Amino acid sequence: MTGTIERSRVHPGRYLPAITTALTCGLATIACAEVRVEGDPQSVRVTTDQEVVSDVLSAFAVPFNVKYRTAIPLDTAADATYAGSLGQVISRLLNGYNYIVKRDQQATEIVVYGRRGEVTIQPKAPPLQNGVLSRWR
């Protein structure tokens, strides 16, 4: 009994436009995500492409030595612009959340407990390594 086996032939260039389009759209989305922070702690201007609150807080890390921890995801979209002192901007950004802010000469620490009106659970402190807190966001 002899049979014929047919092989399906895949054209390598056939899917290239679809793959290129998908990658380009994905990269364009990543490239558009941006938080711009200008000024000093007394006069801050923040502009966003309506990123999530956690991204805006993360953008404060380098220029203002801000660290935060949270018990819930901070995935609410931020407003497009904020202006004022660092404390005022943080207050407007975290409107609707239960949080505390601890400041000293070197750093600002923010702890977000939950959304206003919900039961809150205190976020765990990061572990100590050689007497120093680690894994801050």
Image (cartoon, rainbow, N blue to C red):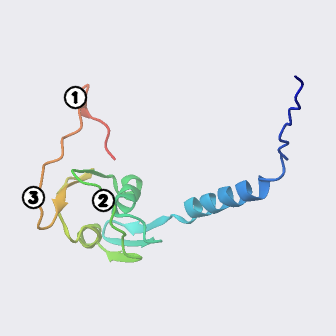
Taking depth in this image into account, of 134 and 73 the one nearest to the observer is 73
Q: Check disc 3: other Cα within 10 Å, few if <14, some if 14-19, many if 20+.
A: few
Taking depth in this image into account, of 13 and 27 the one nearest to the observer is 13
Q: Considering the numbered disc 3 on the image, is that residue within a helix, a strand or a loop? A: loop
Upstream in sequence: badge 1 or badge 3: 3
Counting every numbered tag in the picture gives: 3
Residue 64: image tag: none
Upstream in sequence: badge 3 or badge 2: 2
Q: Name the residue carrying label 2.
A: 74
Q: Distance between the residues labelled 3 and 2?
A: 16 Å
Q: Is residue 31 left or right of residue 124?
A: right
Q: Check disc 1: other Cα within 10 Å, few if <14, some if 14-19, many if 20+.
A: few
Q: Which of labels 3 and 2 is toward the front?
A: 3
- Residue 124 position in % (x across, y down): 18, 41
- Evaluate whether residue 33 shows in this view: yes
Q: In this view, does 124 lie to the left or right of 48?
A: left
Q: Residue at x 41, y 58 (%)?
A: 59
Can you tell which quarter of the image residue 99 is in?
A: bottom left
Q: Residue at x 36, y 70 (%)?
A: 78
Q: Which residue is drawn at 24% across and 38% down?
A: 126
Q: Check disc 2: other Cα within 10 Å, few if <14, some if 14-19, many if 20+.
A: some
Q: Please name the amino acid that badge 1 sits on.
A: Gly
Q: Considering the numbered disc 2 on the image, is that residue within a helix, a strand or a loop? A: loop
Q: Please name the amino acid that badge 3 sits on.
A: Val
Residue 119: image tag: 3
